[in-house]
Image: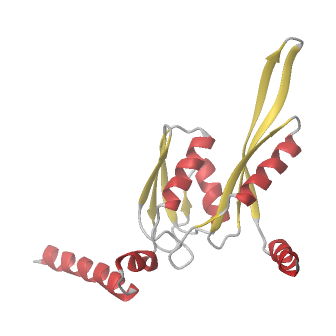
Amino acid sequence: MAQAVDRRKAEKKEELVEKLVHINRVAKTVKGGRNMSFAAVVVVGDQKGRVGFGSGKAAEVPEAITKATNEARKNMVRIPLREGRTLHHDVKGAFGAGKVVLRTAPAGTGVIAGGPMRAIFEVLGVQDVVAKSLGSNNPYNMIKATFNALQSINSPRMVAAKRGKKVGDIVSRRENSSNVKMEKEEA
């Protein structure tokens, strides 16, 4: 019982940033006319590598946003970041007709992304990334494609664990292969 109370206090203490991505007015035609409702898409994150998204539908906008926010908090995932500011490697993601390409960027580049992807990166805590949306610009598909890409990112620690090696072996191999490429280009 005490653990449950402590967990609730910890959840309240952690600062989550919420971004409203999209609101859609939905009309359902019924016998007496049209029933209007609102659908909202919200992205939630702690700006330290955790992010989640949710959608909610209700008769009023604030209720829809509240439902979406609650769903986003439940669906949070941890994404490994390099130096806490960018992605470990370039990655592609897809969902339905929406396709996205996410690329790492050097320090000082900023977030070069549009629409829903920008909101995801801001609440995730990524400071340097270049992203491109290909195909559908539907916010639902773009968000799900971006999450598909983010969840396929592997940190050097994860790769080392899978291969049964040390992190230094994985990272040094990458640096050595880039040095070999440079030497071949100079020759």
- 96 or 101, which is in the foreground? 96
Extreme left residue here?
Answer: 187
Quadrant of the rendering where the N terminus is positioned:
bottom right
The scheme the figure's colours follow is: secondary structure
**165 left or right of 181 in image:** right
Provide residue 86's location: percent of width, then percent of height: 52, 70
Compared with residue 31, is residue 157 higher up or lower down, i.e. above or below? below
User: Residue at horizontal 57%, vertical 77%?
Assistant: 84
Quadrant of the rendering where the C terminus is positioned:
bottom left
Compared with residue 114, is residue 44 higher up or lower down, i.e. above or below? below
**97 left or right of 183 in image:** right
Provide residue 104's location: percent of width, then percent of height: 45, 66
Compared with residue 86, is residue 168 higher up or lower down, i.e. above or below? below
User: Residue at horizontal 67%, vertical 70%?
Assistant: 47
Residue 79 image-quadrant placement: bottom right
Number of residue marks: 0
Provide residue 127's location: percent of width, then percent of height: 58, 69
User: Residue at horizontal 46%, vertical 51%?
Assistant: 93
Extreme front residue here?
Answer: 1
User: Residue at horizontal 63%, vertical 57%?
Assistant: 120
